[in-house]
Image (spheres, rainbow, N blue to C red):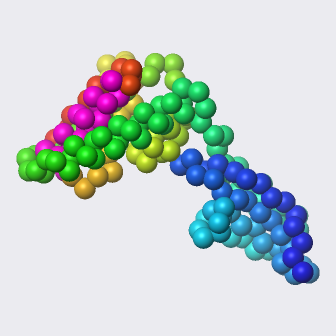
Amino acid sequence: MTRKIKKADITLADGKSAILSTVELQHGLYETMLASPDFDTEYAVLRTTDEAQAISDFNHLRKQYHVAPLSGKYAELAEALKKAFTVGKEAAGRTHDGGTCNFDAPTLNLKGWAEAKVKQAAKAAGIGCFVWNLWGSKRYVFSLPIGAQGNARTVAAEAMSNSLKIAGYDAGMYYQAD
């Protein structure tokens, strides 16, 4: 008979919900699992014969995977980035992908914002993010995980930057030919 020991609903870095649970499966066999709420996806499963170790595993997984849900301006940024990413993908789909291979991407000047939260917002929007230090000024660059690598990538990045400007952000562009 299964005995529940600890359970928590957590938020992953990409904004998805997950369940973290530690149970005793049978006498002397403990399992700690991090899974999607419907249990279709298991992110981590740890087994041990020691209850104290099972509780330690629970605490370790919570510390490693759980992030506080975005709120305020960071939640708004995540939504703006999601919308901009959609706009960028649509623009790329209407453009022939010839031209020079590049790493063009939209940028944001978010002076005073917490870097970890900006990166969390990007991850929640399904895109990457890195900091670009430009002559003493810090800008966030948002990478585009799309199949385009030439003109379509530039068009997508520019469309995304424009969408972020319309949303009220100080947006610009990062241009880099490969």
Coordinates of residue 160 in the picture (x, y in percent): 30, 35
Name the foreground residue: 37 vs 67: 37
Which residue is depicted at the point 59% across and 27% down? 72
What percent of the width, then of the height, locates residue 16? 58, 52
Q: Is residue 76 above or below residue 177?
A: above
Name the quarter where the N terminus is drawn.
bottom right
The reply to whether residue 166 is in sight is: yes
Residue 44 visible? The answer is: no
Report x, y in % for residue 108.
37, 26
Asked if residue 33 is among those painted magenta in the image, a careful observer would answer: no
Residues drawn in magenta: 149-166
Q: Is residue 10 above or below residue 160?
A: below
- Left or right of 139: which side holds 90? left
Residue farthest toward the left in the current orientation of the protein: 99
173 lies left or right of 38:
left
Question: Which quadrant would residue 136 be assigned to in this image?
Answer: top left
Question: What residue is drawn where x is 16% and y is 48%?
Answer: 94
Q: Is residue 44 above or below residue 178?
A: below
The dominant secondary structure in magenta is helix
On the rendered structure, is 174 left or right of 13? left
Kindly identify the residue that appears in the image at 84 percent across and 78 percent down.
Answer: 25
* Side of 100 relative to 158 (left or right): left
Q: Residue at x 88, y 64 (%)?
A: 5
